[in-house]
Image: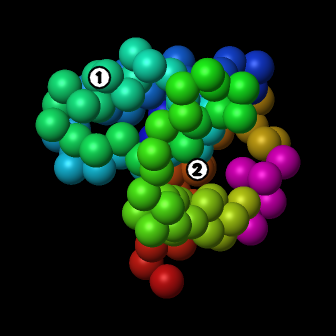
Amino acid sequence: MTLSAAQESDIKQAEELLSEHEPEVVIADKGYDSDALVAEVRSRGAVAVIPPRKNRLEQREVDWHLYRARGVVEWFWSKIKQYRRVATRYDKKAQNFLAFAQVASIMVILR
């Protein structure tokens, strides 16, 4: 889990998120659609399941069956946001917010 500025785009976090992993499949939403990221994923021997944006000239094929697995992550964040401290971000310091988000994650996983 990493924390970024609210106005920062999702794709800027992709390299850091992938740095310590050797995935078989990388599933992400349209916010991660870029030729560079797809090439990086493929160079690691993984399959990129990232739907292309509508305005792309060259539309990529997407395995929509695999893409449905992304829902697990969305549902997980939905559960995490049930903790008001995470949903409203009461903590002013980033490290305190991240620490509680990690605690909330553990609490959700242990249920």
Residue drawn 80% across and 60% down?
A: 84
Which residue is the extreme one toward the bottom? 111
Q: Earlier in the sequence, mark 2 or mark 1?
A: 1
Q: Is residue 96 visible?
A: no
The answer to whether residue 31 is left or right of residue 22 is right
Secondary structure type for disc 1: helix
Q: Marks 2 and 1, Cα distance to the nearest angstrom?
A: 29 Å
Crowd around label 1: few <14 · some 14–19 · many ≥20 (10 Å)? some
Q: Position of residue 59 (x, y in %)?
A: 55, 34
Image height check: is 81 above or below 54? Answer: below
Badge 2 density bin: few <14, some 14–19, many ≥20, Cα 10 Å:
many
Q: Which mark is residue 40?
A: 1
Q: Nearer the viewer, mark 2 or mark 1?
A: 1
- Nearer to us in this view, 111 or 5: 5
Q: Position of residue 90 (x, y in %)?
A: 81, 42
Q: Residue at x 84, y 48 (%)?
A: 88
Q: Is 83 situated above or below 55?
A: below
Q: Which residues are magenta?
A: 82-88
The answer to whether residue 24 is seen in the rendering is yes
Query: In which image quadrant can residue 92 be found?
Result: top right
Q: Between 78 and 22, which is closer to the camera in this rendering? A: 22
Q: Is residue 57 magenta-colored?
A: no
24 vs 95, nearest the viewer: 24
Q: Can you tell which quarter of the image residue 14 is in?
A: top left
Query: In terms of image quadrants, where is residue 48?
Result: top left
Q: Amino acid at mark 1?
A: Glu
Residue at label 2? 101
Seen at 72% across and 60% down, the residue is 81
| Residue type indicated by callout 2 | Ala
